[in-house]
């Protein structure tokens, strides 16, 4: 299993892309999907998570039966993400002047499976490719 710890700031998205692009645990036929998903999940965390302590996350990549991306971070508003997953449909947000909700839907459709888990000290988004 490979790990990357990075500040959850959009200026660091290149580190995520490089980590995914060079990981030996991601087969070539899954790499583009992994890049799309990882940048979308990273963007979502960086933009919406309410961090406790340092604003950073850890991305772990493994490949037991299927390639797996595991994002973990310390957040106080993970429930908001879980609620958004159930309630939000893709829509135009006139305040932001952009569409919302497509990233999570796209991630769900590209991935084999997406799991969301919250423990006492960490929140996890686990994506199977």
Image (cartoon, helix red, strand yellow):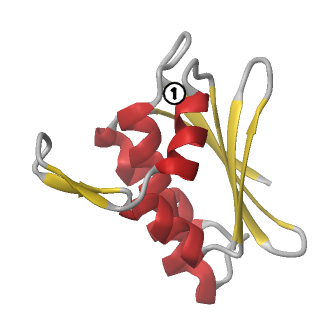
> Residue at 81% across / 74% down in the picture?
66
Give x and y (percent) for residue 73: 62, 30
The residue under the point 11% across, 47% down is 94
Q: Image check: 73 left or right of 40?
A: right
In percent of width and height, residue 100 lies at 30, 54
- Give the quadrant of the C terminus: bottom right
Residue at image x 58%, y 18%? 76
Dividing the picture into quadrants, the one containing residue 39 is bottom left
Residue wearing tag 1: 56
Q: Report the front residue among 43 and 76.
A: 76
Q: In this rendering, is residue 19 above or below 49? A: below
Residue that extends furthest to the bottom in the rendered view of this protein: 29
- In the image, 15 versus 51, the foreground residue is 51
Farthest residue in the right direction? 65
Element marked by disc 1 = strand
Which quarter of the picture shows residue 103? bottom left
* 96 relative to 129, above or below: above
Viewer-side residue, 26 vs 45: 45
Query: Would you place residue 76 above or below residue 127 in this image?
Result: above
Q: Using the image as rendered, state which of residue 125 and residue 88 is in the foreground.
A: 88
Q: Residues within 10 Å of mark 1 (few under 14, many from 20)?
A: some
Position in image of residue 99 (x %, y %): 23, 58
Is 39 displayed left or right of 4 in the figure?
Answer: left
Seen in the picture, residue 78 relative to 102 is either above or below; the reply is: above
Q: Residue at x 40, y 33 (%)?
A: 48
Residue 22: x %, y % from top left: 56, 68
């Amino acid at each position: 299993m490979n790990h990357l710890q990075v500040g959850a700031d959009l200026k660091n998205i290149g580190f995520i892309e490089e980590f995914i692009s060079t990981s030996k645990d991601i087969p070539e036929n899954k790499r583009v999907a992994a890049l799309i998903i990882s940048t979308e999940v990273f963007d979502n965390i960086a933009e919406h998570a309410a961090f406790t302590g340092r604003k950073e996350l850890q991305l772990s990549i493994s490949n037991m039966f299927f390639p797996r991306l595991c994002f973990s971070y310390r957040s106080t508003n993970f429930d908001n993400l879980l609620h958004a997953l159930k309630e939000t449909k893709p829509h135009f947000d006139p305040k932001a002047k952009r569409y919302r909700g497509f990233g999570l839907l796209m991630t769900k459709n590209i991935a084999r499976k997406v799991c969301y888990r919250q423990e006492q000290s960490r929140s996890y988004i686990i994506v199977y490719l």
